[in-house]
Image (cartoon, rainbow, N blue to C red):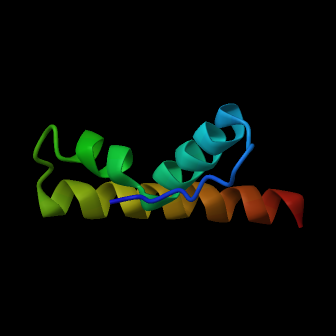
Amino acid sequence: MIIIPVKEGENIERALKKYKRKFEKTGIMRELRQRQAYIKPSVRRREIKKHAEYIQKLQQKDA
């Protein structure tokens, strides 16, 4: 559970902004989206490898 201490006289908009920032850092929504569909481990490894190759290509291009 995310707890946001709100000080006396503090703007509710500021407290809401703090809540949204903390919620985003927890990664709950990212995890829920990933769990919507099962991805086989072999497919997941393939995607990770493909992404790593892409990043490496970008870094070599800049250097």
Q: Quadrant of the N terminus?
A: bottom left
Q: Is residue 45 left or right of residue 19?
A: left
Query: Residue 52 location, x and y as percent?
Result: 52, 64
Where is residue 41, by image quadrant? Answer: bottom left
Residue at image location 59% in from the left, 38% down from the top: 16
Query: Residue 23 location, x and y as percent?
Result: 47, 50
- Give whichever of 31, 21 is nearer the camera: 21
Where is residue 42, by image quadrant? Answer: bottom left
- Give whichever of 23, 29 is nearer the camera: 23
- Give whichever of 61, 12 is nearer the camera: 12
Residue at image location 45% in from the left, 59% down from the top: 3
Where is residue 37, by image quadrant? Answer: top left
Residue at image location 25% in from the left, 58% down from the top: 44
Report the number of discs.
Answer: 0
Q: Is residue 25 left or right of residue 8?
A: left
Q: Quadrant of the C terminus?
A: bottom right
Q: Residue furthest top?
A: 13
Q: Residue furthest front?
A: 8
Q: Is residue 53 left or right of residue 43?
A: right
Query: Residue 5 location, x and y as percent?
Result: 57, 59
Q: Is residue 23 above or below residue 62?
A: above
Query: Residue 48 location, x and y as percent?
Result: 39, 61
Residue at image location 63% in from the left, 44% down from the top: 15
